């Protein structure tokens, strides 16, 4: 049985124009309680058999889980603790946005057992934050991290985005430097992706839009990120993730190892015994019946087992891959691999194929070319 749990909390203060996740603006909070009740009901109804595996990681994502009142989070955690056995060293992560958690709430998070915060900062540039409709400013972003550290959180991560409209290399560099002035142990940095059916998709329909940083600037931003992280002792262990030693996200490592995990909540995905499933994306439908319309997703196991490890510093075990899928990548992609090696984009070490730090920026292209 899975030893990891993902829970989706869909509520947000604002709807970011680049986001295509299942989120719901609820300024009154009237849907909070019925949603948590539906969520608890799903957990109780689906975890009907003994789960002997100790839970190693729990991740509450969204949306903005920190928007919920402590009392409702407590109700959720009481259900979780009654249905699962948790490892004493479990990693429990809560996604938290600036402006949604004061000192009282932060204390409440600790009391519930939450021991890792992932703070959605995105940038420390106030002008860019307004353009992203984030609902917070740079000072609020810094304060929530400082206050969380004062409340005893010793494992804090923050998110940044590069490639934003009108973002300059200078402002990007400044955001990274300001991040490292804070008491953090982990940083996740993502290139802006213009997703379909989002406000940004209507505005920035052309990748050559002059408001968007162009390819050379994106490469420079990524290289600056890698350089500054290395200088501050944050090792790159995945394409978008950097951490001090021992502070890698255990939950996300399970995703990249393609191990089983539970998924609860509206639109939540899970992976159990070789099946990927997804809950309904309709919030009203989920609240009425949280067990309805869980669908099985199509998957390509050979692609997953190639792509996921190649995104990490540990790389792909070629022998294991060949044994499992009868695919000899070294033979089938000999010329490509040699070419990528000559460009210092990949390397071979002890039968592991690894993408180099230089190659991480091109990881999507590299992986697509290596596909059998």
Image (tube, helix red, strand yellow):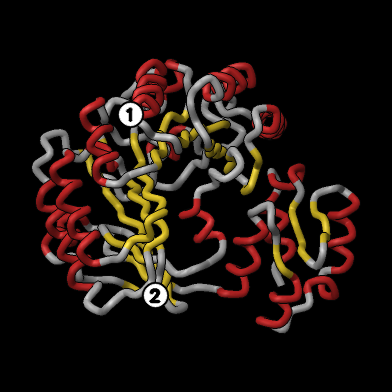
User: Of 366 and 110, which appears nearest the observer?
Assistant: 110
Report whether residue 202 is seen.
no
Q: Earlier in the sequence, mark 2 or mark 1?
A: 2
* Image quadrant containing the N terminus: bottom left
Q: Which residue is mark 1?
A: 151
Dot 2 crowding, Cα within 10 Å, few <14, some 14–19, many 20+:
some
Kindly identify the residue that appears in the image at 42 percent across and 60 percent down. 56
Q: Which residue is mark 2?
A: 1
Kindly identify the residue that appears in the image at 68 percent across and 52 percent down. 313
Kindly identify the residue that appears in the image at 11 percent across and 62 percent down. 288
The residues tagged by marks 2 and 1 sit, at their Cα atoms, a distance apart of 34 Å
- Relative placement, left or right, of 324 versus 99 is right
- Residue 49 screen position, x and y as percent: 25, 79
Quick one: SS at disc 1? Answer: loop
Q: Quadrant location of residue 29?
A: top left
Q: Quadrant location of residue 337?
A: bottom right
- Relative placement, left or right, of 77 versus 207 is left
Quick one: SS at disc 2? Answer: loop
Dot 1 crowding, Cα within 10 Å, few <14, some 14–19, many 20+:
some
- Residue 215 screen position, x and y as percent: 68, 34
- Residue 123 screen position, x and y as percent: 48, 25
Q: Is residue 158 above or below residue 357?
A: above
- Residue 236 screen position, x and y as percent: 65, 42
- Relative placement, left or right, of 92 versus 305 is left
């Amino acid at each position: 049985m899975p030893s990891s749990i993902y829970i989706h909390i869909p509520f947000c203060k604002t709807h970011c124009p680049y986001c295509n996740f299942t989120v719901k603006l609820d300024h009154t909070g009237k849907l909070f309680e019925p949603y948590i009740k539906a969520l608890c009901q799903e957990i109780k109804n689906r975890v009907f058999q003994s789960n002997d595996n100790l839970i190693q990681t729990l991740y509450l994502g969204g949306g903005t889980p920190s928007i919920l009142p402590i009392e409702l989070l407590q109700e959720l955690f009481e259900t979780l603790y009654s249905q699962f056995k948790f490892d004493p060293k479990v990693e429990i992560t809560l996604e938290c946005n600036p402006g949604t958690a004061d000192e009282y709430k932060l204390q409440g998070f600790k009391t519930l057992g939450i021991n890792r915060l992932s703070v959605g900062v995105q940038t420390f540039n106030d002008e860019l934050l307004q353009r992203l409709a984030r609902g917070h400013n740079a000072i609020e972003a810094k304060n929530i991290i400082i206050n969380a550290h004062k409340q005893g959180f010793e494992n804090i991560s923050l998110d940044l985005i590069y490639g934003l409209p009108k973002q300059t290399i200078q402002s990007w560099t400044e955001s990274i430097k300001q991040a490292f002035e804070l008491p953090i142990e982990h940083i996740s940095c993502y290139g802006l992706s213009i997703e379909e059916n989002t406000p940004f998709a209507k505005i920035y329909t052309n990748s050559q839009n002059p408001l968007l940083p162009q390819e050379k600037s994106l490469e420079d931003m990524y290289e600056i990120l890698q350089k500054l992280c290395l200088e501050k002792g944050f090792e790159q262990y995945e394409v978008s993730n950097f951490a001090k030693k021992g502070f890698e996200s255990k939950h996300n490592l399970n995703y990249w190892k393609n191990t089983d995990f539970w998924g609860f909540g509206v639109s939540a995905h899970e992976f159990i015994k070789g099946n990927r499933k997804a809950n309904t994306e309709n919030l009203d439908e989920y609240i009425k019946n949280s067990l309805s319309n869980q669908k099985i997703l199509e998957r390509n196991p050979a692609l997953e087992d190639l792509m996921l490890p190649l995104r990490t510093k540990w790389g792909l075990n070629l022998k294991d891959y060949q044994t499992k899928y009868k695919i000899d990548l070294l033979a089938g992609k000999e010329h490509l691999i040699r070419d990528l090696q000559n460009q210092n984009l990949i390397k071979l070490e002890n039968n592991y194929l690894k993408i180099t730090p230089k190659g991480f920026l091109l990881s999507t292209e590299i992986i697509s070319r290596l596909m059998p």
